[in-house]
Image (spheres, rainbow, N blue to C red):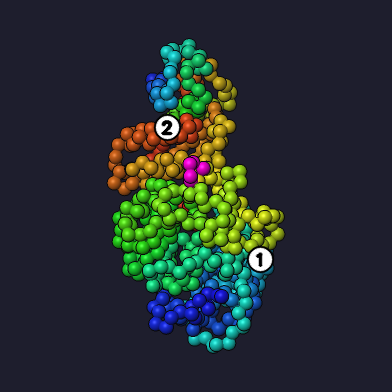
Amino acid sequence: MKETIISEIKNIARENDKVLAPLSDDLVLSESGLDSLCFAILVARLEDRYGFDPFSSSEDAYFPVTLRDFITLYQKVPV
Amino acid sequence: MSLRRAIENMKPGDNRWVWGVGHSLHLMRFIKQSCLHGHRDALAGKSVMLLTPDQFSAAAALIELDGLASRILVCPPDVKGDHLPAIAAQAAIDTVVTAGDAPATVSLGISQNIVCSFPPAPSDASRAAEIETQWLLLTSGTTGVPKIVRHSFRSLTGAIRPIANVDAPVWSTFYDIRRYGGLQIFLRAIVGGGSIVLSDANEPVADFLERLSNHGVTHISGTPSHWRRALMSPKADIFNPFYVRLSGEIADQAILDCLRTAFPRAAIAHAYASTEAGVGFEVNDGFEGFPAAMIGMTDRGVEIKIINDTLRIRSALTAANYVGETMATLKDQDGFVDTGDIVERRAERYYFVGRRGGIINVGGLKVHPEEIETVINRHRSVRMSLVKSRKNPITGSIIVADVVLSDNDAAADQQQLRSEILAECREVLSPYKVPALVRFVPSLDITESGKLVRTNA
């Protein structure tokens, strides 16, 4: 799942002409080079792939700060 | 003038018909005989609700009732039974004309129920003096009780001009004649010296196309969605019209070009018309949108202006008013109808970008789904597309697209096509308008009035 998310992030960055920061676990998302539209697209595509959107489906939804947080949010939800 | 008078004025020996799926009649039989079986005197001056299950009986009843009834309320096929009592009350209906197995009218509390049936019976000549009948049509596209729009024979037929070079046009339309778009074509056929082939909602497209070919249809209209569906049929090329007309939705360049290729001898026109605004204008130059020079008074006596990017129309062809207790006003104080259709000027042309009510909000930015569909439809492998919003936790909504491929591309490399479509979108659209997801679907739903079903619009 982590690989899929990372590869989708790279796709979206490429499609939208964004320069990505190196995708380390500790990367702060707001400094990743993706804007909110890119994240919106990412969430929509992951929802399409996995059938859920952890932001809307979990009760204690919070906005992830780092890339690790983001991926964990998806890994937490049973597929 | 009335429908009956138009038929009486027919040249002797003219072979003009209304062809339906179950019945067909020579025009003269509609006025020499009676499908309402001698009830004509009982219908004089009445407010009649026309509630027939098929278009052919509607055509017969319209011909008999126009000039005789004080008003005819034409119910479209998808009118909801539970809306009928409110509609009947607002229009002060006192008589219902049905046919075959029309919905039960008992609950309407209207005692006079006359059945239209075939074959027509001989009819005596007695007839009340001709009056100007009000034509009441229902608006489409609303979820509540539809609004009732009042027209007259004059406002409905004022845009009809004789057709040059064609003696006896054979008209047809994918529309149902119980709606404004289809009614226009029915009236064009009857008033304009022609015949008409009626469509039928239960008939497969291929069978309809075959009937069009059999009857030698010369002039035909439909929405872009109707046409895209027709072009997907392998039988699309079995008829060879002189005139192809699009209305009711935005005609983009892709569909205009496809039609030109499919019907090389036909003039391809797209018309702007609506139940409320009437026939606005027709664009014949083969391009999407319309020339900016059309703003102002057209040579057809229609006045067009743009206020807040919205098309407004004033003419003798617009509806008169809404009937009933609605608070809505159909025209502003200067007599202009606000169409709710948003246009955008680029150089010397205006382009339709969508409906005022259909806007999707992506992170505070407005998106008209139609604008994006127009771009997607340009791809050579795309037959039609539907752009819609999907809820999104980051931007509130995001754009997604459902795409139907042309038949021969159904087996193509979808990933490749998706990239091409998205690349095309990125080239001409702002990033927030580019679909986040493109799904390939076998078909898209089309409403009874021939328009794409838009759930979020």
Distance in Å between CA atoms under marks 1 and 2:
50 Å
Q: Secondary structure at mark 2?
A: helix
Pointer 1 chain: B
Front residue of B8 and B148 = B8
Image position of B336 (left or right of B394): right
Residue at mark 1: B91
With respect to residue B356, does A33 lie above or below? above
- Which SS does the magenta portion mostly show? strand
> Residue B67: x, y in percent?
59, 76
With respect to residue B325, does B257 lie above or below? above
| Tag 2: amino acid | Arg
Magenta region, residue range: B345-349
Instruction: Indicate which disc residue B426 carries.
Output: 2
Front residue of B225 and B304 = B304
Image position of B396 (left or right of B219): right
With respect to residue A14, does B20 lie above or below? below
**Which residue is depicted at the point 57% across and 53% down?**
B296
Q: Secondary structure at mark 1?
A: loop
